[in-house]
Image (cartoon, rainbow, N blue to C red):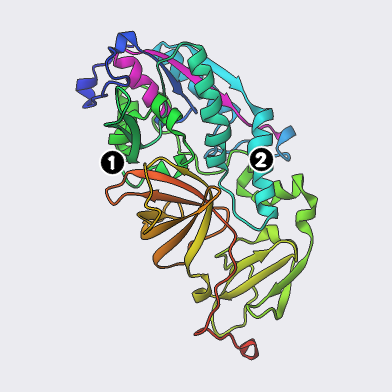
Amino acid sequence: MTVNLAELGVDIPALVPGKKPEETTVVVAMSGGVDSSVTAALCQAAGYKTVGMTLQLWDYTPASNGGKTKEFGTCCALDDVYDARRVCQKIGIPHYVLNMESAFKGAVIDDFVETYLAGATPIPCVRCNQRIKFLELLEKAKSLGADVLVTGHYVIKEWVAGSRGRGVARIRRAEDLAKDQTYYLFTTTQEQLDFIDFPLGHLTKPQVRAIAKQMGLHVAAKRDSYDICFVPGGDYRAVVKKFAPEAEAPGNIVGLGGEVLGRHDGIVGFTVGQRKGVPGGFEQAMYVVEIRPEAREVVIGPREALGRRVFTVRELNWLGGTRNEERGTRVIVKVRAQHAGVPAVLHDLGDGRVEVVLSEPEEAVSPGQAAVFYTADGVMLGGGWIEMTKAPALRAVRVEIAARV
């Protein structure tokens, strides 16, 4: 397929500084969606020696999936593999499939279940990037003699001056902030980042779909992936119960003072910040404030009780250079993927942990989620996992149990 990138209004900067496209072998991580498909097509059209590679992570057949078939809006299932292969045939590049189902179960699904059992809320897509996708794809790409691994993430990569010849790679938020995916890449190491590129960082989603249509790719209108690939119909509770029946152990729903307010059928049915399923009849709406897995208790309180100004982060992965150990490091922190971000100061605690002090209380802080740090102009500095924290002491909030109807 011959395509003129200038006619498409697309310019792909050199993926490997100092090397011409025709001298550069590119492996494209292809999920079967429109983003990675367009990425592969653009690389091929730019003259790169392009290879498509897809990871098969989960067998989404009724026999292995609780009797349910694969639904649109998931990713990494068998029909996505077929879509990736069809795109590669269309643009005329080789396509390889790596079956990683066994490794995926141990590295991602088991972690997903264990995190819920610990009273936290996991982000399996980050664990998949960290433990499966980038590790396996980079190893395979290098074994094929590739010069660079390319993905369809909406991220901008740039090189800054450094001690090495071409400097140090860093990533910043995408041009299309609504599609920015830097939050999900905070576990990427510097070595990995030096070898990966993201050609879609300066494009918007509508532009990518338009390019796919112009190139005649059958996935141009394919729906984006939102559901977790191994969670049929979005019912994560069923997945946790399948692998860990003890998740259904009942317990008490308690107030901030420890008073018993009701019963539950398993802590897996609750996440911090949740309102649905919480007992009613109070003067104020009540939310899940804390989950205590050892006692099998779900702690509820008014919305004000959700606010956190100080919390800790573990397994810090830092890409932003030297931190200020004396005065703390000033950053912008996002505590959810769609979080706007707030100013904060980081203080090193050692052992890969930092204390995060927010400029103002934030309700969205939840154990198991990620805290990802940025500069004011959008450069991603790193991130880590939010640790389980106790509910803050409330002086101004009083919940009168007598007010319950």
Compute the Cα span from label 1 to label 2. 32 Å
Is residue 330 left or right of 286 when viewed as pictured? left
Q: Position of residue 330 (x, y in %)?
A: 34, 56
Give neighbour class at mark 1: few <14, some 14-19, many 20+ (Cα, 10 Å). Answer: some
Residue 354 among those drawn in magenta = no
Q: Which residue is mark 1?
A: 175
Q: Residue furthest top?
A: 23
Q: Position of residue 240 (x, y in %)?
A: 71, 49
**Is residue 77 in sight in this rendering?**
yes
Give neighbour class at mark 2: few <14, some 14-19, many 20+ (Cα, 10 Å). Answer: many
Q: Quadrant of residue 127?
A: top right
Query: Of residues 339 and 393, which is closer to you in this image?
Result: 393
Counting labels gives 2
Mark 1 or 2 closer to N-term? 2
Quadrant of the frame with the C terminus: bottom right
Q: Position of residue 280 (x, y in %)?
A: 62, 78
Is residue 271 left or right of 335 when viewed as pictured? right
Badge 1 amino acid: Glu
Is residue 126 left or right of 160 when viewed as pictured? right
Is residue 297 left or right of 28 when viewed as pictured? right
Q: Which residue is mark 2?
A: 109
Question: Where are the magenta residues, as a range?
Answer: 36-62
Identify the residue shown where x is 70% and y is 54%.
117
Query: Of residues 289 and 80, which is closer to you in this image?
Result: 289
